[in-house]
Amino acid sequence: MEEASSQGGPTTLFSPYKMGKFNLSHRVVLAPMTRCRALNGVPQPALAEYYSQRSTVGGFLISEGTIISDTGAGFPHVPGIYNDEQVEAWKKVVDAVHAKGAIIFCQLWHVGRSSHEVYQPRGGAPISSTNNPISKRWRILLPDGSHGPYPKPRALEIHEIPQVVEQYRQAALNAVRAGLLLTTLKSEERILF
């Protein structure tokens, strides 16, 4: 499968590529996919195994959405990166990927209004840029496996926005502590913004 490269010559999906300081063996990237292999936001050994199985020498993986704070969750069993226990667990994931010669980036995630009180600290309303709930035609997966309507979120006050920015900053620092090389931000119209 050939395509034109930015240098003007043909390239193939399986040809090496230099991405900044990273030398990739090929151009196949593992895209983020929610795997639900964490308990209380802590990546479990099954998550390390999952990423290791998909690692190749010179390969590039992007983690699933990784929650930046306890208010950022909205799906059962997704990993977080906002406390020390989570950082330590991510180190095992990173070690498993690096042992195969691949690199892994962390996708930072706050689900915003795509949450439910059951996922929020003290059962509070999910935070968002708006107090408008997600359309009733959409349902949220609850921890017991049932589906329910999205609740009305609480619009952030202007003075609260820097707190969310700080949560992203701290999560990025935690990702670096865990050995995740770079981060990406997951944001969608119906999520936080």
Image: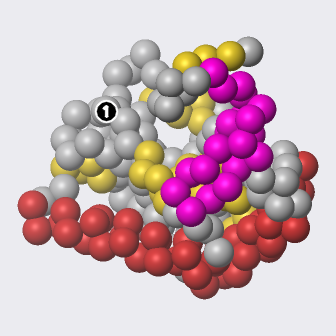
Question: Would residue 46 be visible to someone looking at this image?
Answer: no
Tell which of 158 and 184 is nearer to you. Answer: 184
Where does the image place residue 157, in percent across and percent down from the top left?
12, 59
Whether residue 15 is in magenta: the answer is: yes
Magenta-colored span? 10-29
Q: Secondary structure at mark 1?
A: loop
Tally the marks.
Answer: 1
Q: Is residue 107 left or right of residue 95?
A: left
From the top left corner, tell me how far across and down residue 173 is, in percent.
47, 77
On the picture, is 182 further left or further right than 150? right
Q: Is residue 1 visible?
A: yes
Q: Where the N terminus falls, by quadrant?
A: top right
**Which residue position holds label 1?**
189
Q: Name the residue rendered at 52%, 57% in the picture.
A: 20
Up the image or down, 59 lies above or below 188; here it is below
Residue 193 position in % (x across, y down): 26, 42
The coloring applied to the image is secondary structure
Residue 121 lies, with reference to residue 147, above or below; the image says below
Quadrant assignment, res 131: top left
- Residue at 19% x, 63% y is 161
Instruction: Characterize the local packing of mark 1: few (<14), some (14-19) or many (20 or more) Cα atoms within 10 angstroms.
Output: few
For residue 186: magenta? Answer: no
Q: Position of residue 8 (x, y in %)?
A: 50, 24
Residue, far left:
158
Identity of the residue drawn at 65% across and 44% down: 17
Up the image or down, 190 lies above or below 121; here it is above
Front residue (pair 72, 108): 108
The answer to which of 115 and 31 lies nearer the viewer is 31
> Which amino acid type is shown beneath numbered disc 1?
Glu
Q: Residue at x 42, y 62 (%)?
A: 71
